[in-house]
Amino acid sequence: MPRNSPPTLRRAIAAAGGPSSRLAVGPGSSASWSQLAAGSVLNWRAAEFSGLTVVVAAMDQFAAAAAMIQLDGVVRRMVLYPPDLSREHLDFVVKIAEADVVLTDHPFTAVVEAPIVFVESGNKLDNSEMETEASLETEWILLTSGTTGRPKLVKHNLASLTADLEFGRAPGPPVVWSTFYDIRRYGGLHIFLDAVCSGASMVISSPDEPLGDFLPRAGELGVTNISGTPSHWRRALMSPWAGRIAPRYVRLSGEIADQAILNSLRSQYPHAQIGHTFASTEAGVAFSVKDELMGFPSRVLDHTSGVEMKVVDTTLRVRSDRTASCYLGADNPVLKDAGGFVDTGDALELRNGRYYLVGRRDGIVNVGGFKVHPEEVEAVINRHPAVAMSLVKSKKNPITGALVIADVVIRSPLNNEDPNTLQRDILQFCRVELAPYKVPAIIHIVPNLDVSTAGKMVRRNA
Amino acid sequence: MDIRAEVTTQFKQVALEQDKQLLPLTDDLPLIDCGLDSLCFAVVVVRLENVLGVDPFSTEEDVRFPVTFGDFVEFYKNAAQ
């Protein structure tokens, strides 16, 4: 455990929280951290879950936040199931995590081999003392996308998730955090834990809350620090409500921050500090850069307290007490090498003393914070009866960072048929089978695809 | 080429593909309210680059993102000049 790290979230709240620090969600709903720690969204059943493995699969962020606080230290293992992940993977997650129970706040139709327990809305809290013993070191399991479309289960604990955070109330003016991320994703969870551990207030969105409601609400609640991916920020800046918040600190993470988005944020928020953070679910938070230039100075690799970094075979490797410990399940790759380094898979290029992120070595495309494995999309396109082979690649995009596009070789030449009709048909085929962010933006019909001497398709990104 | 017509076509086509309800595309319509989400806009930008040969979002000098549909059309008209 790092210095001063409290063993459970409820201890962290007791140490840092005060009656004035609150978690606010949706119009008019909020609770102090102490109320969240003392109340029960679990209908006073937390003790029944003692020592068990629990999947938290609530839609409502507030219910999930309350469940996290109330289950940490009580359960053996807690799996955070994001609301945007299809419920069709729930049974897979239950099996891999060896879950005993699934907590949810909404009915769903997926078949799951574990009992389902309904949690109350996060608003139904009272001030009764929760008596459940909280002394376990709970495993925190986060989900990221895997090569087959099924999620990978990444194992952390409270110590690794909070290893870079300060505990206890920070001096200076009060901080009110917010984030465009969902708190079940690493980027959002890290902000949530920062607020809990430092006794800051936090504003989060309610399910399906439009940006036009969220940003003015965040502004009225005095948000000082706010984080999101470059895609989240571009969306905010293309709305009429970007001026409704006046943050002191703007943070970007989860995707490559290009110079255009850094400049746009500077122009919109002239008084804010703007930083971009390199972090991933597996590697944890590696470092932050606040010089408002894309990329990062090469000295960061050797001069970041608590984190060792090196570049091997062009990709960034990270070793620290913030990294995850392993993937759950037998079929997954090794998360750390023998020396304890996590290969982030992010390729770097050194130019004039600065490193620039140039994409993923493994070809994964990051579409607005969601990972797309080209092979998964190719497998779907290749099932189309007219398709002989296909190559899915990344195309840079100013809105979502990247998109996928596809080159397709067809089985027989188009005679008098309209190529547009076939392109539309392939796209429709993809839309039925794939999540919208995995569907290629453009299908190019090409005469052939380059194949290397090793028999593999030559992958070059646009 | 009629930039406005091309932009309008792409908005409508992407809305149709992604099953989104598109509001009438008037100049003062805020983009965020038009019915398209970020992914739709990303697709529109790629398709317009394919047709018009320009992606004005990627020019670093202009740091103002368009907010209304009218801004968006002007953004492309200026870039295509």
Image: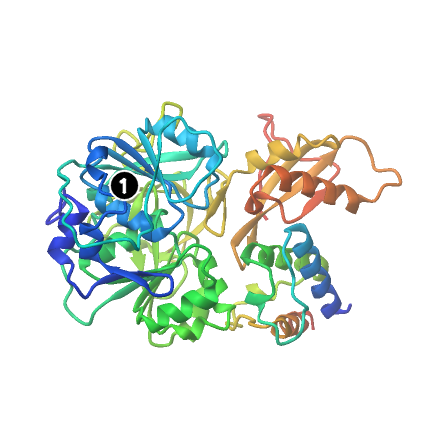
In the picture as drawn, the residue positioned furthest to the top comes out as: A330
> How dense is the environment of label 1, judged by Cα within 10 Å: few (below 14), some, or many (20 and up)?
many
Residue A211, compared with residue A156, is above or below; it is below
State the image quarter where residue A320 is shown: top left
Image side of residue A202 versus residue A213, left or right: left
Secondary structure state at the residue bearing disc 1: loop
What chain is tagged by disc 1? A
Residue A289, compared with residue A315, is above or below; it is below
State the image quarter where residue A168 is shown: bottom left
Residue A455 in view in this figure: yes
Residue A139 image point, x, y percent: 24, 36
Number of dots carrying numbers: 1
What type is the residue that disc 1 sits on? Thr
Residue under the image location 34 percent in, 73 percent down: A220
Q: Relative to the observer, which residue lies in front, A259 or A119?
A: A119
State the image quarter where residue A250 is shown: bottom left
Residue A150 in view in this figure: no
Q: Relative to the observer, which residue lies in front, A217 or A398?
A: A217
The residue labelled by disc 1 is A323
Residue B20 image point, x, y percent: 63, 55
Image side of residue A47 versus residue A297, left or right: left
Residue under the image location 40 percent in, 34 percent down: A152
Residue under the image location 46 percent in, 33 percent down: A89
Residue A329, compared with residue A421, is above or below; it is above
